[in-house]
Image (spheres, grey):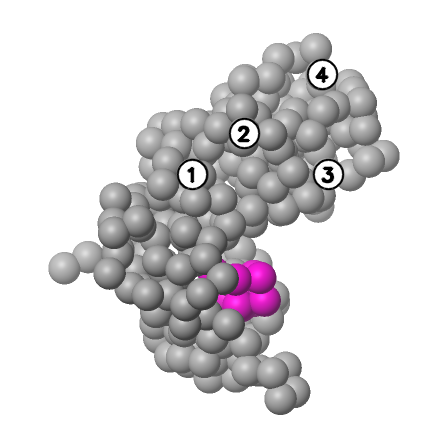
């Protein structure tokens, strides 16, 4: 049987007395799109940062392609991170740089690459997310929120990563623009064959982009299953969360 792309085993992380992750067990298959849902402060972002190596867990194991990443540092960690793209919640574009330099930022670090080549790469990746060359020289502040998200998505795929993390990709967007981003994520997963992990509070987004959904509650995965079972999970925590009810086991 092929090794899962990402495997977390008994991952725990506390900040002082606050136990954020308390035994996370999760396997994500290559080419799979997984959505992670849960309350604000439930540890979703901390879990992603542990996978990225930005935070070291207190216990447990995290494997990428069968290689343990907990404890990696320096060049070994950089080699692993090179496989990963990231779409941050606030897009995190560099305000002082034009769009084309934002898109190719990760390609130019420590390398001498011609501006013309970088512009061509930026144009190619912008085209993948439905934007044209007319915005290459614009600054992020000159773009709408939806366009900024797409530029950030173009940057995330420019390195042709094997894994992409999406942190609340539709936050701050109206339903129509949010659905545009959802469609782009679906097409990129299909076209590029990447493994996608998305943190989201948007249930419409989770149902559209994910093959499977996992819910994190009090530091543990309390349910995981196919997206079609999200509203028919039989799990009281999931039912309360997706239906937005005040009454239930989540206080």
Question: Residue 175 got which mark?
Answer: 2
Badge 3: how crowded within 10 Å, few (<14), some, or many (20+)? many
Q: Residues at badges 1 and 3 in contact (C-beta under 8 Å)? A: no
For marks 4 and 3, give the CA distance.
14 Å
Identify which residue is drawn at 59% across, 71% down.
55
- Tell me, yes or no, if residue 237 can be seen here: yes
Q: Where is residue 232? Give x, y as percent.
A: 25, 51
Residue placed furthest toward the front: 247
For marks 1 and 2, give the CA distance.
9 Å
**Side of 164 where 55 appears, left or right:** right
For marks 1 and 3, give the CA distance.
26 Å
Identify which residue is drawn at 14% across, 59% down.
1
Which residue position is annotated with label 4?
135
Q: Earlier in the sequence, mark 4 or mark 3?
A: 3
Which residue position is annotated with label 1?
204
Q: Earlier in the sequence, mark 2 or mark 3?
A: 3
Which residue position is annotated with label 3?
93
- Tell me, yes or no, if residue 154 can be seen here: no
Q: Residues at badges 1 and 2 in contact (C-beta under 8 Å)? A: yes
Number of the front mark, 2 or 3: 2
Total marks drawn?
4
Q: Earlier in the sequence, mark 1 or mark 2?
A: 2
For marks 2 and 3, give the CA distance.
22 Å
* Picture layout, residue 161 above or below residue 237: above
Badge 1: how crowded within 10 Å, few (<14), some, or many (20+)? some
Is disc 3 placed on a helix, strand or loop? loop
The residue closer to the viewer here, 18 or 55, is: 18
The residue closer to the viewer here, 241 or 99, is: 241
Task: Tell me the magenta residue range.
Answer: 38-47
Q: Earlier in the sequence, mark 1 or mark 3?
A: 3
* Picture layout, residue 9 above or below residue 230: below
């Amino acid at each position: 049987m092929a090794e899962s792309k990402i495997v977390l085993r008994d991952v725990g992380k506390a900040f002082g007395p606050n136990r954020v992750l308390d035994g996370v067990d999760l396997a994500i298959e290559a080419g799979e799109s997984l959505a992670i849902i849960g309350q604000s402060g439930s540890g979703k972002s901390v879990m992603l940062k542990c996978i990225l190596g930005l935070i070291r867990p207190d216990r447990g194991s995290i494997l990428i392609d069968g290689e343990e990443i907990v404890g990696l540092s320096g060049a070994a960690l950089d080699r692993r991170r090179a496989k990963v793209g990231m779409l941050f919640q606030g897009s995190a574009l560099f305000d002082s740089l034009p769009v084309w330099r934002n898109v190719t930022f990760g390609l130019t670090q420590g390398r001498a690459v011609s501006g013309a080549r970088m512009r061509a790469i930026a144009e190619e990746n912008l085209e993948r997310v439905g934007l044209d060359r007319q915005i290459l020289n614009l600054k992020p502040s000159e773009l709408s929120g939806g366009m900024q998200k797409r530029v950030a998505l173009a940057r995330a795929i420019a390195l042709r990563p094997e894994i992409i993390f999406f942190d609340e990709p539709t936050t701050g967007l109206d339903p129509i623009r949010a659905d545009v981003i959802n469609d782009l994520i679906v097409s990129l997963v299909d076209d590029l064959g990447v493994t996608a992990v998305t943190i989201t509070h948007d249930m419409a987004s989770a149902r559209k982009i994910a093959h499977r959904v996992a819910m994190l509650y009090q530091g543990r995965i309390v349910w995981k299953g196919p997206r079609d079972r999200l509203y028919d999970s039989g799990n009281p925590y999931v039912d309360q969360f997706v239906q937005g009810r005040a009454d239930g086991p989540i206080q």
